[in-house]
Image (cartoon, helix red, strand yellow):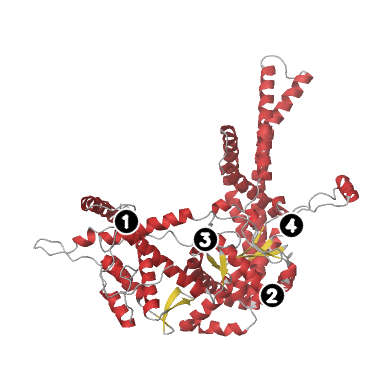
Amino acid sequence: MGVEVGAQSARSRALAVLRVRSRALAVALLPAAVAVVLLVGGSTGHITGGSWPVTRWIVTVLAVLVLLAAAGIALVVARARPAVSPTVPIAEASAPDLYRLVRDLADRLDVPPPSAIALTPDCDSWLEDRTHPAHGPPPPEHRDEIAGARGMGGGAGRPRRAPAAPVLVIGSPFLWWMRVGELRAVLAPVVAGTGPSAHPDIAAARRFVRGLDAAVAVTSEPARGPLVRTVLAGVGWVTRLLLRSCRGHAAEMERGVAAAAAERAQAVDYGLRIVAQEQVGLAYAGWDRLLTRVALPAWRMGRWPARLDAGVVAALTELSRRDRLAEGFASRLGERPACDLLEEPGSVDEAASLLAARLFHGGPAEPGPDWAPVDWQEYPDEVVDRTWRTEAARLHRVLDALGVRHPTDPTQPDPGGPTLARVLDHLTAPATPATDDADPSVDRREAYGERGTGVSLNETETNETETETEVEAEVEVEEEVGEDGEPVLGSERTAALAAGLSAELAREEAAAPAVASGPGGGAEQPGPDWSFWDDGMLPLFPLQPPRSGRELLADHVTAMVCCAAMDTAGAAPGLDWLDGPALLVDGVRAADLGPRVLTLVEDGDPEPLRNWLRHLGVRPEKPVRLV
């Protein structure tokens, strides 16, 4: 009963959307109908004399203009390519068991099976309509002249139309974390949506709305000439008006389709579906943590982890080891994982990982010398160690540009080398003599903010120029802190260093080569379908906003501390599946480093960090190896 109610509601809303299209067509044909009446009336002698001849010509010209405008708008709507989600297509030959599972599920639900299966690097699943001719495969080449001649007359040479059934898009983390039964239970309500989608009215309404949406995107693109901009502005105004008119009906139609699909899927693995929904939330948490803490540092170094989906399993297994509430999740790993439904899960994982780097970071479309895959076993040396040493080298370059002197210690073999002591001495807030009427909080309020600095890195400032710059920066920071309320840094020198790091990183990013576009993956393995979306929009889903000066400085100081620990105390780089790069001392992760670095950066107090270094046996005065 619930299935029929939801489907009936969706069909009624689809008819409402189609009525908007019919009204638009009627408005376009109305001037032509009036012109026909006037012309017929004039030719038969019923409408003659007076101003009727002038009216007849005016209405006829107006009708022609309206028909031309309507034809142009209809042409733009018909030829506009609807948006398609970036996915990794999965051929049936590379996943026969997965296709068999989906078809059996469709048979149990008594709905048409999806036309194809694709994977997306996200924790979600949906049906996507790709029936537009632009989304179909290219027409086959006819090498037989007789067959080509027959195709010209009989239509056999025309390109095949894409299948009517939608494409099933599955989140790739689901295949690696979920078991086969859990995946079937999660996909049941999604596959059940193919039933309402096959109704002609619902399919026509969806094509109309998607065409309007694609036309709006076309008219929003920057045009070259003023005439083209004017024409596209008119087309955009009409399509936006139509889209607003049917937006509410389209949303209610989709709700009805979802309600009907959910009601139909109630009879399929209902109890297991409740348990599987818990795994969906857990997989989403692990995937988000893996991308932001583990994958993002590698992407910034020009490396992309080639087994992100396998990393989700490791991250969630680590979570189950740490969290007593997740102890039951580790026992599931003994069951058959859903990735066994793929013939080559490694190739699919690599293609999904490359697509994730493309979407969330804007990396190149295919591997290269500056964009190479990295395995999890090589991650500590290829990513963690290189990241720390690169950031430490950048930190000392900025210190050199600011004219910061090296600590003078004649006992050291390389007194001018990069040392942690140089960083600690520079970031330590200078002690100011106390006065009777001094405000104890004035140093904190008058310190630099994250972006309140105007220090030049290309020239050496004189004492007079430094004094003027400090006064201007203090006024600038007081206004910014007053508006934003963000924490200030420990001293003016700390803020200048943070600004220098921001400028240096911006120059490096600007000098980086442009992102290359092209097909990803080899010819024998699945790869993302790059042709459906524009490179200029990348990254589509940035993981984090740009780092502030305070965050950059804290990251670089942490990197310098880790380099000193590795070179002087025998520490090693490591990978924590939940927190990303980690410093290992005697095989154990070193803890409590972050708060001590923030104390140095924000308050200018080096004592907590010095005590931490002394406890681990790190020698700050020793030079470190940089990239």
Residue 37 in view here: yes
Mark 3 → mark 2, Cα distance in angstroms: 29 Å
Please identify, in this view, whether the residue under mark 2 or under mark 4 is nearer the observer. 2
What's the amino acid at mark 1?
Answer: Asp
Query: What is the x, y in percent for residue 313?
Result: 56, 77
Please identify, in this view, whether the residue under mark 4 or under mark 1 is nearer the observer. 1
Mark 2 → mark 4, Cα distance in angstroms: 25 Å
User: In this view of the protein, which residue sits in the foreground, 241 or 471?
Assistant: 471
Q: Earlier in the sequence, mark 2 or mark 1?
A: 2
Q: Earlier in the sequence, mark 4 or mark 1?
A: 4
Please identify, in this view, whether the residue under mark 3 or under mark 2 is nearer the observer. 3
Q: Secondary structure at mark 4?
A: loop
Q: Secondary structure at mark 1?
A: helix
Please identify, in this view, whether the residue under mark 1 or under mark 3 is nearer the observer. 3
Quadrant for the N terminus, please. Answer: bottom right
User: In this view of the protein, which residue sits in the foreground, 141 or 606?
Assistant: 606
Residue 361: mark: 3
Mark 1 → mark 3, Cα distance in angstroms: 28 Å
What's the amino acid at mark 3?
Answer: His
Q: Which residue is mark 4?
A: 164
Q: Residues within 10 Å of mark 4 (few under 14, many from 20)?
A: some
Q: Residues within 10 Å of mark 1 (few under 14, many from 20)?
A: few
Quadrant for the C terminus, please. Answer: bottom left
